[in-house]
Amino acid sequence: MTVVLTICVIMLGVSALLLVTRIALGPTMLDRLVALDVLLAVMICGLALEAAINRHTTTLPILGVLSLLGFVGSVSVARFTRGSDDVEAEES
């Protein structure tokens, strides 16, 4: 059981590190926003993993709030983007 938990924690840590580099180096603002949304999903998975390890339900309200925050953020970003994914057009 501890091997599975260790692998899960390592995978979540590596994905969070890669997402932080995408946020820092993303060529467009949309890339950064998508990386932030995925980072929020990784944080939700980390909290759910912690709740499963310790066998408690005290973090369920936090998980619900973070899920709603991610949903509202994704919908608002999708609503206010121009619809262009051309990197060269956005740089000029």
Image (cartoon, rainbow, N blue to C red):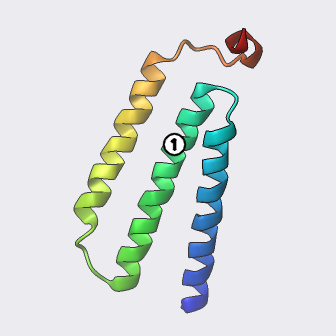
Q: Is residue 37 left or right of residue 58?
A: right
x 70%, y 29%: residue: 27
Q: Is residue 12 above or below residue 78?
A: below
* Percent of width and height locating residue 55: 32, 83
* Percent of width and height locating residue 41: 47, 52
Type of amino acid under label 1: Leu
Mark 1 lies on residue: 36
Q: Is residue 3 above or below residue 46?
A: below
Residue sitting at the far front: 24
Q: Is residue 31 left or right of residue 58?
A: right
Which part of the image, by quadrant, shows the C terminus? top right
x 53%, y 47%: residue: 38
Q: Is residue 45 above or below residue 31?
A: below
Q: Is residue 61 left or right of residue 30?
A: left
Residue 3 in which image quadrant: bottom right
x 28%, y 54%: residue: 64
x 63%, y 68%: residue: 11
Residue 22 in which image quadrant: top right
* Percent of width and height locating residue 75: 40, 29
Residue 51 in which image quadrant: bottom left
* Percent of width and height locating residue 28: 65, 26
**Callout 1: SS:** helix
